Image: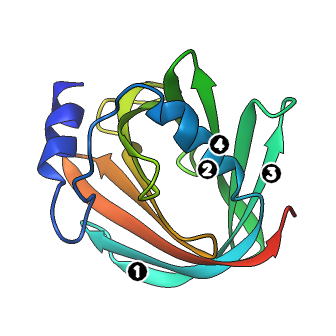
Amino acid sequence: MAFVLTSFSAGVRADGPSPVPPVAGEASKAMYERLKSLAGTWRGTVEWTGARTSSGTMSARYYVTGNGTALVEDLESDGTIAMTSVYHLDGSDLRLTHFCGAGNQPRLKASVVDPPAGHVRFAFVDITNLKTPESGHVSAVELRLDGTQKMTLIFTFVGAGRESYERIELTRVTDHG
């Protein structure tokens, strides 16, 4: 796990996560309320950089469930849901469980939050179904909301000692889908 934390902090650069203010007070609750406003359908592009390189198109569907206590994000590529994330509060912490196409489920906690700017970064906490310590998995996630119609997701993916970034740029297609 020390490698994951080290690789996350080393990932702060132009092609990876950006610096944002640390979590404070009611920021997690305010950010969760802002995230719930993503409900709807989104479309855009995906680009991998780092150890893996490729690009393509991606769509996303966001919906609120659990009587408002969870936001589900389904990311689709080529007509198939490739991965799902669930955002929720745990007390005063904003959490994320990512159901990865790699077959594992990293759990992350917001480490930095800036609700007015629409920025949140999640850091790795633990993981289920990781076959080996070298197996590929998400170690960090960042969301950058640009108003109500555009957003960027950045997944930091580590495996076999190498790091990649999956940058997804999305534009809203419909509300409350």
Element type where label 3 sits in the image: strand
Where's the N terminus, which quadrant?
Answer: top left
User: Are the residues tagged 4 and 2 within 8 Å (C-beta)?
Assistant: yes
Left or right: residue 36 compared with residue 141: right
The mark that comes first in sequence, 1 or 2, is: 2
Left or right: residue 104 compared with residue 53: right
Left or right: residue 100 compared with residue 138: right
State the residue position of label 4. 33
- Is residue 116 visible in the rendered structure shown here? yes
Element type where label 2 sits in the image: helix
Tell me the kind of residue under disc 4.
Glu
Residue for point 45% across, 83% down: 55
Tell me the kind of residue under disc 3.
Tyr
Q: Give the CA separation, mark 4 to mark 1.
A: 33 Å
Element type where label 1 sits in the image: strand
Label 3, residues with CA under 10 Å away: few <14, some 14-19, many ≥20: many
State the residue position of label 2. 34
Q: Nearer the viewer, mark 4 or mark 1?
A: 4
Residue for point 41% across, 43% down: 137
State the residue position of label 1. 54
Q: Nearer the viewer, mark 1 or mark 2?
A: 2
Q: Nearer the viewer, mark 4 or mark 3?
A: 4
The mark that comes first in sequence, 4 or 1, is: 4
Choose between 143 and 80: the one closer to the eye.
143
Q: Quadrant of residue 117?
A: bottom left
Q: Quadrant of residue 166?
A: bottom left
Label 1, residues with CA under 10 Å away: few <14, some 14-19, many ≥20: few
Residue 59 vs 29, above or below: the answer is below
The mark that comes first in sequence, 3 or 1, is: 1
